[in-house]
């Protein structure tokens, strides 16, 4: 089979009852538009779902990455649903992630999040889509490190000869707009020096040492695009599994520990990333805590088989209990750090407007 492209493009285009959930009417409209695109031969197959208030479009096609046709389809879908459904129903923050008036050939930089992979399918091609709500792209840093560089999470790094040589991580500097590739395990400490600052340095791609593409993540930072807080980025991630890559269970194991991520209420707080099934992918408590879902697909010729709702499993009940306890603990800090983000992150929120009125009231400290 020739190369195929797996794309997931998402956007917050308005939600029911605050930043809570997508409506069935929005989902229906998205399915209809992608169904028409499939009937016309633009895409092979599709799947529509949501995580919290983010509408997620999964598309299988042969147009390659960054295709104006595929990105245009997603953009037009989001725009039409915003105009015909979100605004009609007066949904909250209708069209929030659509930061431009017109499509320019690629949705990157316009607000929606994108993760894509073009590859030649193996005999059996398991794909996992991870999608998160109420957090930023740096939320993937720790799980991706654990999957591709930590043998305590991925024993295949030790016992599978196809993975034993390690992986190549592409890290993006979101501020400078630059990327660097680092090899593991030999540059492990250099990698950690960067990705330990997830607000600036994010893992965007991972390859096996022989060049096999393993992972692709969205890197959109809405505040850096708009220059102000317009909603959290709510990233997506696509990974290939098995056959010389980490097993599905090794990927999921990396999320069993609900690590702390930035986002949550008003995009201004730190909270635990809770792995949940689709039925629980609705953020309510303090607009959270942040959630992540995992959907497993198989590619069969030009079809998507699935998905399997991978976190909808009692084996992750402990992780959810820990996340709830951590949420309780950190919530008691209220407006204090480390629950509230540091000043460099709060710069893009509405807090500077509050602080500005106090600026002229400061005077030199006497006797200091």
Image (tube, rainbow, N blue to C red):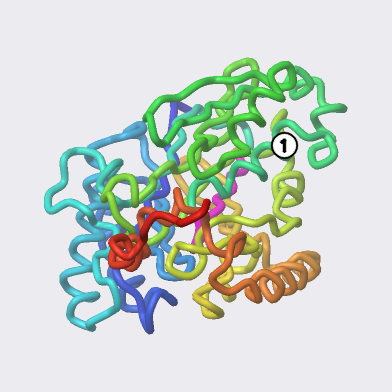
Q: Is residue 8 above or below residue 167?
A: below
Q: Nearer the viewer, residue 303 or 258?
A: 258
Q: Is residue 234 visible in the rendered structure shown here?
A: yes
Q: Which residue lies furthest to the front in this view?
A: 367
Q: Which residue lies furthest to the left in this view?
A: 102
Q: Is residue 350 above or below residue 151?
A: below
Give the residue displayed 58% in from the left and 40% down from the top: 239
Which stretch did the figure color magenta? 125-135
Q: Where is residue 88 in the image (x, y as percent from the top left)?
A: 18, 81
Q: Where is residue 108 in the image (x, y as percent from the top left)?
A: 30, 41
Q: Nearer the viewer, residue 250 or 354?
A: 354
Give the residue displayed 82% in from the left and 34% down from the top: 151
Q: Is residue 350 visible in the rendered structure shown here?
A: no
The residue identified by callout 1 is 246
Q: Is residue 207 inside the magenta stretch?
A: no
Give the residue displayed 22% in from the left and 46% down from the top: 72
In the rendered view, does 244 fall on the left or right side of 66?
Answer: right
Give the residue displayed 36% in from the left and 81% down from the top: 16
In the rendered view, does 306 fall on the left or right side of 188?
Answer: left
Q: Where is residue 202 in the image (x, y as percent from the top left)?
A: 52, 37
Majority SS type along the magenta span: strand
In the rendered view, does 83 fall on the left or right side of 186?
Answer: left
Q: Nearer the viewer, residue 23 or 90?
A: 90
- Residue 26's image quarter? bottom left
């Amino acid at each position: 089979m020739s190369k195929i492209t797996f794309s997931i493009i998402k956007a917050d285009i308005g939600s029911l009852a605050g930043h809570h959930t997508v409506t069935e009417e929005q989902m229906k409209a998205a399915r209809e538009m992608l169904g028409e695109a499939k009937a016309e031969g633009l895409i092979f197959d599709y799947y529509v779902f949501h995580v919290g208030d983010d509408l997620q479009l999964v598309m299988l096609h042969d147009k390659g990455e960054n295709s104006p046709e595929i990105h245009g389809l997603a953009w037009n879908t989001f725009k039409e649903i915003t105009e015909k459904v979100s605004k009609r129903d007066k949904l909250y923050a209708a069209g929030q992630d659509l930061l431009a008036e017109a499509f320019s050939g690629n949705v990157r930089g316009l607000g929606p999040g994108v993760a894509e992979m073009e590859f030649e399918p193996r005999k059996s091609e398991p794909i996992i889509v991870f999608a998160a709500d109420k957090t930023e792209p740096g939320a993937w840093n720790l799980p991706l490190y654990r999957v591709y560089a930590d043998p305590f999470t991925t024993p295949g790094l030790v016992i599978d000869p196809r993975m034993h040589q390690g992986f190549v991580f592409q890290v993006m500097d979101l501020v400078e707009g630059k990327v660097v590739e680092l090899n593991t395990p030999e540059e492990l400490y250099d990698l950690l020096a960067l990705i330990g600052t997830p607000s600036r340095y994010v893992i965007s791609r991972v390859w096996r040492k022989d060049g096999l593409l393993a992972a692709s993540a969205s890197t959109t930072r809405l505040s850096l695009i708009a220059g102000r807080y317009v909603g959290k980025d709510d990233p997506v991630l696509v990974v290939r599994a098995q056959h010389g890559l980490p097993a599905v269970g090794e990927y999921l194991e990396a999320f069993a520990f609900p690590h702390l991520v930035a986002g949550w209420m008003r995009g201004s707080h730190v909270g635990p990333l809770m792995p949940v099934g689709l039925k629980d992918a609705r953020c309510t408590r303090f607009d959270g805590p942040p959630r992540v879902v995992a959907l497993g697909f198989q590619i069969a010729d030009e079809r998507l088989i699935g998905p399997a709702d991978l976190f909808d499993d009692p084996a992750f009940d402990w992780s959810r209990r820990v996340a709830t306890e951590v949420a309780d603990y950190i919530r008691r800090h209220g407006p204090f750090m480390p629950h509230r983000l540091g000043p460099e992150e709060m710069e893009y929120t509405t807090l500077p407007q509050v602080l500005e009125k106090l600026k002229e009231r400061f005077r030199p400290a006497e006797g200091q």
